[in-house]
Image (cartoon, helix red, strand yellow):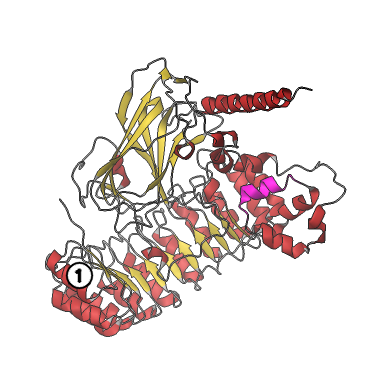
Amino acid sequence: MSPVFPMLTVLSMFYYMCLRRRARTATRGEMNSRRAIESNTRALPINVEIVQYAKEVLDFSSHYGSENSMSYTMWNLAGIPNVYPSSGDFTQTAVFRTYGTWWDRCPSARMPFKRTPPTFCSQDYVELAFEEPVYPTAVHILETYHPGAVVRILACSANPYSQNPPAEVRWEILWSEAPTKVNGPQARQFTPCIKQINFPTNLIRLEVNSSLLDYYTELDAVVLHGVKERPVLSLKTSMIDMNDIDEDEDEEKYGCGMDTLNKQFSIVNLREWPTNGYFDKLPYELIQLILSHLTVPDLCRLAQTCKLLYQHCCDPLQYIHLSLQPYWARINDTSLEYLQSRCTLIQWLNLSWTGNRGAISVSGFSRFLKVCGSELVRLELSCGHFLNETCLEVITEMCPNLQELNLSSCDKIPPQAFNHIAKVASLKRLILYRTKVEQTALLSILNFCSELQHLSLGSCVMIEDYDLIASMMGAKSKKLRSLDLWRCKNITESGIAELASGCQLLEELDLGWCPTLQSSTGCFTNLARKLPNLQKLFLTANRSVCDTDIEELAANCTHLQQLDILGTRMVSPASLRKLLESCKDLSLLDVSFCSQIDNRVVLELNANFPNVFIKKSFTQ
């Protein structure tokens, strides 16, 4: 055989692999910036580009603003810009509830789930509807204050304005990147390089991570560019990256991972092998330990290799703690059904963000909990819009050992449904932020759930009398360590007095934007004297906080670590110095819009107390 023949064979194979890879890339429209193909690709035929602002905000996980106003709410993302290109802190923008890592350093912080893939770092999201479905060519995000929070942009195949919902809803990632710190808080137009998709969309989702930000990020508007006809890519290329021959990493991470859950988890007819190599010599427990570091999609893939590893990957001990939030776009009833036999010992379950738009049904969720709920201790269901009264009833009946329940932003649950929670007497943590819980149900919960240590009632607008709620807490919730009353509209000094007298173990208290509290009644002085263990106190936007209150905190709350007094006109630099000298553990102090605390004072305090992050927002 001629020596030239093997060389020609190798070259032919290489050429075939290149063409195959190029065809697949063109079909999917991949535009990965890390593995870019240098080409003069152009769209054929030429379409007229449509430029549109968001018509409507459909869904979001949290916001700084109130449910009954427009200031600092996600609804400000609809329509044309209100602020851009100006920089600074403006009420007409969209602001999420948290920033930095401060909420992870307080008594109410929750333990993270293990096995969260490193590619998933989203903390919040907002979904925007546009008038016309288009094939996206660009997405512009107008950030007006502390930019850099957006980490993922996704497009949905479902048209929110269609009368006929599709049988299958697809989400495609247009762009994704790890959190990066942007130097400076100034406004910018963020236009990442997005990939092409094979369906038109008028539903865009932004996911954010604010952990690297120095202050709240503010978004003003989102602009979607696109064409009505699907672009056809020219395959004329000038150079091919050798790495393109490898399997596409992003498809592995995002595309087939949870499809594998639905399809490959049920595989039983695996090929017979005479031995399993060195795995036969390893102790069962050691293999289990090694597998415990894999993500759920990796377990799916490994289960297809041999019967021994299939057995290990299906062992219920691998699913004691399970977070499905990173795969929210692909979790459905079928996923839960395949997971049932593996989750009989599950103790921590995170289904936050999952199941919306019909992906998870009430019956599918109920079947899963009836099989897997008996050992559940922690259940995360944030933004689960499929949840209804039947779901809460099943939770309380099937999860007798439940200690932590997160229903944050589950705003579709009817008010009467929350009565069922009172049956879970073992509850230690309950998050009801942005829910429709009513006073009667909450009083029942407080009466029967006396083990509560962490309670979030932020933005619960249907509670009529917070003084009555505070009085019940003081009488029944003696173990309470953290309480979130953010934007509670009607608590007074009477409720604060009952709370401070009965809940003396409190370490964290959020009274931000509670307009009915007045310093002249002595309510803040009473708090400082009765709650010496306070580590975090937010009195955000209470204009009446004065020097006396700050001095009482300095004298009585020496363990204080975080204090927010944004917006007060009555606090002087002298009282802040006393506070900083007395509270040696203080690490966060927000004095934004405090009229007596100008930039010169902030610079001086920063110089004298370098371990304290002193926040002072500005408006251009």
Residue 543: x and y in percent read 17, 65
Residue 587: x and y in percent read 31, 72
Q: Secondary structure at mark 1?
A: loop
User: Counting other residues with Cα less than 10 Å from the Cα at mark 1, is it few (<14), some (14-19), or many (20 or more)?
Assistant: some
Report which residue position mark 1 lands on: 518
Residue at the extreme top:
45
Total marks in image:
1
What is the three-letter code of the residue carrying label 1? Answer: Gln
Q: Is residue 94 left or right of residue 430?
A: left
Q: Is residue 297 magenta?
A: yes
Question: Please, is residue 119 above or below residue 470 in the view?
Answer: above
Residue at the extreme bottom:
555
User: Quick check: can you spot residue 34?
Assistant: yes
What residue range appears in magenta?
Answer: 294-305
User: Quick check: can you spot residue 598?
Assistant: no
Residue 95: x and y in percent read 30, 50
Q: Quadrant of residue 316?
A: bottom right
Residue 388: x and y in percent read 51, 48
Instruction: Looking at the picture, tell me which residue is in the foreground, 491 or 439.
Output: 491
The structure residue drawn at horizontal position 33% and vertical position 37%, both measured from the top left corner, is 191
Instruction: Looking at the picture, tell me which residue is in the foreground, 543 or 501.
Output: 543
Q: Is residue 506 magenta?
A: no
